[in-house]
Image (tube, coloured by chain):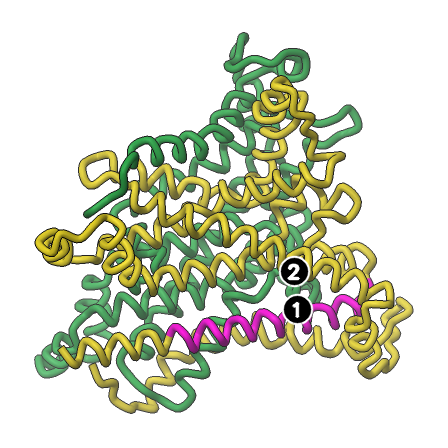
Chain colours: A green, B yellow
């Protein structure tokens, strides 16, 4: 690949720019609050893990992480399982209203969460799902299902049609073909789509906060508790922030080889 | 590849249709319903016709004034974001290492900001930018720049924009990188034989090949910056004054803050309509670009 002069410097400067704020967050999370407020230090003078200990020992804190993971996982499973057959249909067949349907799905991916916050609140209260992980998981489907369909459609289209035809000639039924042949072929695509569902559900706050109050409160909402009458508890807030970065960093590692193609929605 | 007509494919699409319809159509009906009514609490509603819409689209009223102010603010923000992030993203993609472990390392670091919950992104920059405890704010103030994003409008804007560049430039870079990776080596060899300059390689080979992913990047970035809520809300809370109150922030203020259902619903619909139009343009351009490419490849 041809590249530009000074590329090492450019990429290094940019990566430092990306890492600097994260470094500062990690730095703060290991300082005592006293040190944070009183002096300016580039690394903790008296490193402490008191903030982490507090998060892991206080149920209202760590349950926030569990709640977040619950709805993220439910959402990812729902999104992928409904999106898979649809992606196959969009990739292989033409049917009545297919283009309109695809556009409608796409437009939902783009719809602002702020518009849906209030009606979702009413809807999920009415059907008794308010304050459960299911409410948030279903609400997040509005942007994750279209996205999953979109990504998977790109990957299914990369599988040659002859493979379907050969399988059907060999006497495979449709469900068996789907599970035994197609799914292994697009395994990386499924991984990438799951990654994106995980990602967008994990980072979303507005809907997750609106649809929960006590029992299913996500970590991002718990974090607002660090504001108290005595001022901000910066150390605790930083430690909680660091812990929210870790799951993301872990899943990135697994999909690192497909990530670029995934961001192009399987359409490079 | 010709697709065959098969109406039974609807059965495969049905689950998606039901799930999305449940979370999109029912709430949207609620919004339409509210937008035409007025309420004085107690669940008593009165027919208000298009009153809210008239008020919303008339900049001289309070509601209209707020709507248009936040709309222009948001459009300006999206424009600045695109003007910075797209060229920067291309440059980053071109600067990516060629092979070895550095590629994986760069990709992981680039993707990291994208995986951080949006309110934590806000928190990170809130802490990073504070003049008393943040590295950025402290450093700027100690070299004599009076920087404070809480009280100064300009500083608040700079902070929100730098934060967005930090958060999302990686997306553009990763998309462009995916586009660059798909260029076969033969193209470069041909360019070398022709004695093409670096700039010629960029404009004649790399840019046209990145066309499609750039389009996705521009539109995704436009959409997401147009509905930005969490990050500026955490950092500036829409202030100082109203200087960083974008449409979503204004909308949530009206809907969940003041519980002005009618006004919020009317605003939601107009907001949604703008998104829908932009989305339609995106979709048309995308599908046409796809068709164009297929025709070209067929001709070869």
Lateral position of residue B71 relative to residue B161, left or right: right
Q: Residues within 10 Å of mark 2 (few under 14, many from 20)?
A: many
Indicate the position of residue B125 as horizontal and vertical percent values: 58, 34
| Vertical placement of residue B69 versus B296, above or below | above
Q: What stretch is highlighted in magenta?
A: B260-286
Main SS class of the magenta portion in the image? helix
| Vertical placement of residue B104 versus A51, above or below | below
Lateral position of residue A85 relative to residue B47, left or right: left
**The quadrant where residue B287 appears:** bottom left
Seen from the viewer's position, the closer of residues A236 and A114 is: A114
Residue under mark 2: which chain is it in?
A
Report, in whole angstroms, how far the alpha carbon at label 1 lies from the one at label 2: 10 Å
Q: Which residue is drawn at 30% across and 90% down?
A: B6
Helix, strand or loop at disc 1? helix
Q: Which residue is drawn at 63% across and 17% down?
A: B142
Q: Residue at x 37, y 37 (%)?
A: B109
| Vertical placement of residue B62 versus A201, above or below | below
**Residue B237 magenta:** no
**Residue B270 magenta:** yes
CB contact under 8 Å: marks 1 and 2: yes
**The quadrant where residue B266 appears:** bottom right
**Number of the label disc, if any, that sits on residue A114:** 2
Q: Residue at x 47, y 37 (%)?
A: A245
**The quadrant where residue A12 appears:** top left
**Residue at label 1?**
B271
């Amino acid at each position: 690949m041809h590249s530009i002069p000074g590329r090492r410097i450019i990429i290094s400067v940019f990566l430092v720019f990306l890492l600097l704020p994260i470094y500062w967050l990690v730095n703060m999370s290991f300082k005592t609050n006293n040190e944070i407020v009183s002096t300016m230090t580039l690394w903790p003078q008296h490193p402490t893990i008191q903030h982490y200990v507090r998060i892991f020992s206080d149920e209202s804190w760590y349950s926030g992480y569990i709640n977040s993971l619950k709805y993220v996982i439910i959402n990812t499973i729902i999104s992928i399982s409904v999106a898979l057959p649809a992606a196959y249909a969009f990739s292989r067949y033409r049917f009545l209203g297919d283009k309109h349907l695809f556009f409608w799905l796409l437009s939902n991916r783009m719809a602002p969460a702020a518009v849906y916050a209030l009606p979702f609140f009413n809807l999920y209260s009415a059907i008794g799902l308010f304050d459960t992980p299911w409410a948030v998981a279903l609400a997040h489907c509005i942007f994750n299902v279209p996205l999953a369909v979109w990504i998977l459609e790109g990957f299914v289209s990369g599988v040659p049609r002859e493979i379907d035809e050969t399988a059907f000639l060999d006497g495979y039924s449709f469900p068996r073909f789907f599970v035994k042949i197609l799914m292994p072929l697009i395994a990386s695509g499924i991984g990438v789509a799951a990654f994106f569902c995980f990602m967008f559900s994990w980072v979303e706050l507005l809907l997750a906060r609106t649809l929960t109050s006590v029992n299913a409160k996500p970590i991002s909402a718990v974090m607002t508790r660090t504001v108290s009458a005595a001022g901000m508890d910066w150390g605790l807030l930083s430690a909680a922030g660091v812990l929210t970065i870790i799951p993301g960093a872990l899943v990135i590692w697994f999909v690192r080889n497909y990530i670029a193609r995934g961001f192009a929605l399987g359409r490079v | 590849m010709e697709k065959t007509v098969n109406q039974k494919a609807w059965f495969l699409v049905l689950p998606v249709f039901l799930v999305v319809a449940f979370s999109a159509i029912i709430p949207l009906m609620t919004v339409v319903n509210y937008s035409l009514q007025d309420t004085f609490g107690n669940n008593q509603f009165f027919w208000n016709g298009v009153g809210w819409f008239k008020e919303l689209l008339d900049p001289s009223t309070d509601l209209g004034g707020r709507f248009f102010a936040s709309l222009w603010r948001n459009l300006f923000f999206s424009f600045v974001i695109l003007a910075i992030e797209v060229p920067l993203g291309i440059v980053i993609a071109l600067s990516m290492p060629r092979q070895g472990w550095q590629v994986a390392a760069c990709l992981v670091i680039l993707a990291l900001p994208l995986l951080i919950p949006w309110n934590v992104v806000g928190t990170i920059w809130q802490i990073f930018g504070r003049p008393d405890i943040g590295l950025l704010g402290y450093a700027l103030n100690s070299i004599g720049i009076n920087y404070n994003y809480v009280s100064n409008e300009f500083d608040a804007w700079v902070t929100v924009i730098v934060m967005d560049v930090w958060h999302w430039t990686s997306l553009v870079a990763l998309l462009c990188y995916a586009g660059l990776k798909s260029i076969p080596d033969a193209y470069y060899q041909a360019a070398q034989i022709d004695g093409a300059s670096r700039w010629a390689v960029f404009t004649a080979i790399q840019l046209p090949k990145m066309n499609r992913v750039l389009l996705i990047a521009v539109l995704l970035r436009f959409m997401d910056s147009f509905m930005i809520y969490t990050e500026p809300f955490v950092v500036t809370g829409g202030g100082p004054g109203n200087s960083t109150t974008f449409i979503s922030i204004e909308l949530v203020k009206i809907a969940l803050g003041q519980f002005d259902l009618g006004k919020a619903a009317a605003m939601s619909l107009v907001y949604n309509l703008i998104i829908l139009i932009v989305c339609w343009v995106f979709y048309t351009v995308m599908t046409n670009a796809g068709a164009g490419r297929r025709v070209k490849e067929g001709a070869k």
